[in-house]
Image (spheres, rainbow, N blue to C red):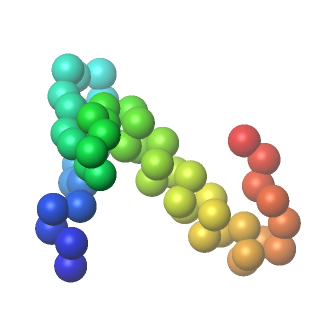
Amino acid sequence: MYVDRTVQFIKNEMGLPWRREFDGHQRTPESSSAIILRHLVRMAEPQFGRTIAN
């Protein structure tokens, strides 16, 4: 749906000197993965009915 905002195979890029620009910010594979995980946690919290600790 949003091809220019899609990250694929991010785990394969971990540890490599790779950066991509999203919303005017340079993102590493690690920072992109963190954003994805935070989003998944926010989506899961209502399902569990509580805050999920870091």
Residue 16 rendering spot, x and y as whole percentages: 22, 22
Q: Residue at x 15, y 67 (%)?
A: 3
Foreground of the two, 7 or 26: 26
Direction front: furthest residue:
24
Where 34 sits versus 36, above or below? above
Where 37 sits versus 13, above or below? below
Q: On the rendered image, what quadrant is the N terminus found in?
A: bottom left
Q: Residue at x 29, y 22 (%)?
A: 15
Q: How many marks?
A: 0
Q: Find residue 6 and report its image quarter.
A: bottom left
Asked if residue 41 lies left or right of residue 37, the reply is: right
Foreground of the two, 25 or 32: 25
Where 24 sits versus 50, above or below? above
Asked if residue 3 lies left or right of residue 34, the reply is: left
Residue 26 rendering spot, x and y as whole percentages: 27, 35
Q: Residue at x 41, y 43 (%)?
A: 33
Asked if residue 3 lies left or right of residue 42, the reply is: left
Asked if residue 39 lies left or right of residue 19, the reply is: right
Residue 36 rendering spot, x and y as whole percentages: 45, 53
Q: On the rendered image, what quadrant is the C terminus found in?
A: top right
Direction right: furthest residue:
50
Residue 47 rendering spot, x and y as whole percentages: 72, 77
